[in-house]
């Protein structure tokens, strides 16, 4: 299998965690932001990563969106399922995944790129890195006002996810899409000192989930 990705994307990390957890061999192709459209539009009709190319005969040629990749992987490799069998727990896991995808992953992006453009500029002050950061900030409208809103959403999310302090998994007694999604989409916060100091339980959980999948730890935790 081939995963088309941006190497720094937390949504692509989500797909990598699922592939690693399922123990499915795969390769990655890192795309260049902007130029990636030329590769992806003919394949999926969309311009977003990750995109999985299963390369498995009659299987679909290209699967866009991390949630759709999860569904395909559970069908292709039923071992180590990403959803609980219990319908109620399955609904809980899918609702958490959707909330994390649509709200919290976006909030993390806003806070992270604002940090990288200011206090975190020293992480990589190179012209190329800062140019990408500025492109992302313009593309998504990341500014002081929108970052303040994102910080509020993250505060609510972290309060809700504190169940991770007392139980191994967010839903039921097995690793699910909820755990993988939270571990991936909150991973950029590991580079921000405020969150590392105020929420140590979060990063203990992120390390635990990455280790359960056999996936390399994100920057700031490795």
Image (cartoon, rainbow, N blue to C red):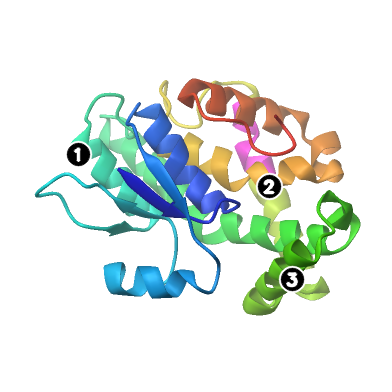
Q: Secondary structure at mark 1?
A: helix
157 in relation to 142, above or below: above
Q: Which mark is on residue 130?
A: none
- Label 2 and label 3: CA atoms lie apart by 19 Å
Please indicate, yes or no, whether residue 92 appears anywhere in the rendered image: no
Q: Is residue 39 left or right of residue 53?
A: right
First along the sequence among labels 2 and 3: 3
Q: Nearer the viewer, residue 174 or 1?
A: 1
Secondary structure beneath dot 2 equals: helix
Q: Does 131 lie within the magenta span?
A: no
Question: What's the residue at 81%, 60% (across, down)?
Answer: 126
Residue topped by disc 3: 131
The stretch in magenta equals: 158-164
- Of the 4 image quadrants, the one containing the C terminus is top right
Tell me which secondary structure the magenta stretch mostly adopts.
Answer: helix
Location of residue 75 in the rendering, given as x and y in whole percent from the top left corner = 19, 39
**Disc sitting over residue 75 in the figure:** 1
Question: Is the residue marked by circle 3 packed among few (<14), some (14-19), or many (20+) residues within 10 Å?
Answer: few
Residue at disc 3, secondary structure: helix
Instruction: For marks 1 and 3, give the CA distance.
Output: 40 Å
Q: Position of residue 1 (x, y in %)?
A: 30, 43
Distance between mark 1 and mark 2 Cα atoms: 30 Å
Q: Residue at x 57, y 38 (%)?
A: 183
> CB of mark 1 within 8 Å of CB of mark 2?
no
Q: Residues within 10 Å of mark 2 (few under 14, many from 20)?
A: many
Residue at 71% from the left image edge and 31% from the top image edge: 221
Check residue 159 for magenta coloring: yes
* Residue hosting label 2: 188
């Amino acid at each position: 299998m081939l995963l088309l990705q941006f190497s720094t994307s937390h949504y692509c990390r989500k797909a990598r965690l699922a592939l690693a957890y399922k123990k499915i061999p795969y390769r990655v192709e890192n795309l260049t932001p902007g130029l990636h459209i030329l590769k992806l539009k003919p394949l999926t009709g969309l311009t977003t990563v990750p995109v999985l190319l299963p390369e498995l005969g009659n299987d679909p040629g290209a699967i866009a969106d991390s949630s759709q990749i999860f569904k395909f992987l559970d069908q292709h490799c039923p071992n180590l399922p990403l959803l609980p069998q219990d319908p109620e727990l399955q609904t809980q896991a899918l609702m958490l995944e959707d909330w994390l995808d649509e709200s919290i992953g976006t909030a993390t992006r806003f806070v992270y790129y604002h940090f990288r453009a200011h206090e975190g500029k020293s992480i990589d002050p190179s012209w190329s890195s800062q140019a990408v950061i500025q492109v992302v900030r313009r593309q998504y409208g990341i500014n002081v006002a929108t970052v303040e809103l994102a910080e509020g959403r993250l505060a609510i999310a972290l309060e809700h996810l504190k169940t991770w302090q007392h139980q191994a998994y967010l839903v039921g007694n097995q690793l699910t899409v909820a755990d993988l999604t939270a571990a991936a989409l909150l991973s950029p916060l590991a580079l921000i000192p405020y969150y590392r100091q105020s929420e140590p339980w979060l990063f203990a959980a992120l390390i635990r989930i990455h280790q359960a999948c056999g996936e390399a730890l994100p920057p700031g935790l490795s």
